[in-house]
Amino acid sequence: MGLEPVLHCKRIIHVCLAIVFILAHQPFAHGAEENTLPWKISADQIMHQQEPEKIIAEGRVILQQYKEDTPTGLEIEADRILYNVDANSVDAAGNLHLQDKNDELRASEAQFDLTNQTGFFKQATIFWQDTNLSASADLIEKTDITSYHFVNGKLTYCPPAKDKDPDWSIWGRDVEITLDDYAKLRHATFRIRDVPVFYLPYFRIGLRNDKKSGLLFPEYSSSDRNGIGIIAPGFINLSPSYDMTLYPGYFSDRGPLLAGEFRYIADFNSRGTLMFNYLDDELVDTPEDDFKSDGRLRTNKYRYWIRGKADHDFGNRLIAKLDIDVVSDRDYLQEFKKGIIGFDQSNSDFLTLYNRGFQAETYDLRENTLQLSKVWTTTDLQTEINIIDDLRDDPEEVTPPWAVPRVAYSGLLPFLQTPLDLTWGTEYVYYWRDEGVGAHRVDLFPQLNGPIAFTPYLESSYLVGLRETLYFIEPNDTLSEEIWDGRNFEHRTFYNVLLTGATTLSRDYDISIKKYKTFRHAIRPELSYLLVQGADQDDLPILDNEDRILEKNWLQYGFNNYFRAIRLDEITLFRSNFSSFKINQVYDIDAEDRPLSDLYFEFIVRGFQNLYFLYDATLSVYGEGVTTYSLETRYKNRRGDSVNLDYRYKLHPEIDPPYFYTDAQGESLHEIRGNFASRLSRLFSIKFDTTYSLSSNSTVDSTFSLVYHNPCWKLEFAASRNVDDTSFYLLFSLAGIGTPIDLSLPQF
């Protein structure tokens, strides 16, 4: 042999490191420290040739890298490995297999230049586990450290399977790959089980996690009112912090539509999204074809919805929030609830990103606001501009007032050297109206509160306040000028007193169930007296709910129970996961008839990891029975199954807390809302959402979705029905490429 075995191993170590570095780029590339790690080699025969100098290992060659006698997970197998010392090149042949912790390469043979780090691999397949991308080709040429050229190459995100074609793949006659950047395919075909489906002369796929411009998968739909529809989105990456998506589409019975979405991210707490939908609608309401059959005929052809939200953190607890919601007509959001640009999807997306969605699709007064808030230790300043998009078409309705602006300053401070606290709420708002009465309104509301020291067993306190409201009135039309008859100033004065008393009794019971050792039951009876009195308000303008303060002389009592299973190391009585049962009622001292409110019951269960349950009801003490009740249930398990159920009933639609007796007439509210999702198997899942009116025995809205989850693609079919339309949607997405699919367009 001519050389010691140690030298043989050292030569073979160099060869192995070259293979690691060249075949698998960064996932396989180890740092300088790992380059010095020892290797163990086994082969049927190891030889050293002097002229030209070569090291040859043949017959079941296996090389493993070790760190402190522990395998690193990197292993190379081949039938033959030859290292040419003078040329600094490597030849490997026969079932070459390179396995790392995450990635894998197979080839029939390979040749590469260690100096230039270039070479080629025949009949090769590479799998990168971090991206789930598989690449294979008749010939793979490595042109530099991170670039490859494939001849007859195939790419897929389907998991590799032996002796089985992937469910889908993209094949190209000529393929260029730049790792962690993109793959360019010329004369490309999209294949299902290796059967060509369609051809593109040029295709580009992004291989890194950042955003790439490109085409998105289209949405197909069929609807009674819309006809056959298609929306084919396209994603445009403007910069790492800005992007936009365009949604061109067409409905056979409606006409062309265009939607767009612009997004930006400034930092972790600062982001914004602006979206628009535009439809050149060929379907106009007629008495014979009226949406919802409500007698409200829509005559406008150009229909749109512009919405958006933005949050910006300026630092030092100064935050701005923007909300935009402008709609062309009162029916648009109800007609286009479903789909990728529908109301439901937009509301869900904005709720996820900004923790606030939009007003319900049935609201006719859409609020657009810009808020700026600043918070100090004990005080805060809130400013707002509020503009209303009025969708009502009733000429008798007065235009809604706009708050331009509203400024509120509130806080809490110790009062002098006493145990009292001074709290205040101060607000200025200018209400502008195009028609009707507007006003400058100044509201001053200071209050003093403090404890009442009767006994250490009774928690008691009092609060007294004085509220003064000033109105500088601006009539904006002839009728308003006649009503106000030259009066341009009004005011009101109110005072309030609140006395509260409560005590807490608790007892612990040993249970020793799993990690919980103690069950705690706490009883908390409460009693309060509230007095709100003031001047007559009939001569004041009505701009919002604050312009009519309800006078009160109430006595309220409650009997509350709290339940918790706790560990021995916990001492806190009330926490976010307790369960409770509450009863309370209000007595109106000034009422001449039926002074007692309905009995209010509330039962909450939230002590279980995956379950939230709330049931509340009101029971009339004057023979009307149950006047309201509601049920809210939320359940989700680790598998992904979930059930949400809301069940609501109101005997009188206008009844509100504290639920005093009312003789107002109107149709009772009785409806159930629910959604259900379940993973039926590894391949199939279902989703079902519905809103059903028990008052009219009709389905307001329902959607059923069946989703097929293949390891490398997904197909979702949805059927939706409301009071005036039935529609179907089909959405397809590929794993790794995803929804949206990252198929980039040339020149972007």
Image (spheres, helix red, strand yellow):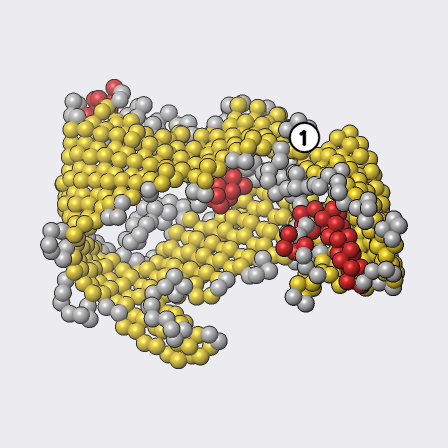
Circle 1 residue: 745
Give coordinates of residue 744: x percent, y percent. 67, 33
Give coordinates of residue 92: x percent, y percent. 84, 51
| Three-letter residue code for mark 1 | Leu
Q: Nearer the viewer, residue 314 or 564?
A: 314
Q: Nearer the viewer, residue 722 or 115?
A: 115
- Would residue 233 appear left or right of 582 to someone viewing this image? right
Bin the neighbour count of mark 1 within 10 Å (Cα to Cα): few under 14, some 14-19, many 20 and up: some
Residue at x 46%, y 74% (from the top left corner): 515
Quadrant showing the N terminus: bottom right
Residue at x 14%, y 62% (from the top left corner): 452
Give coordinates of residue 355: x percent, y percent. 44, 45
Quarter of the image for residue 256 reads: top right
Above-or-below relation of 555 to 329: below
Q: Nearer the viewer, residue 81 or 630?
A: 81
Q: Secondary structure at mark 1?
A: loop
Above-or-below relation of 435 to 384: above
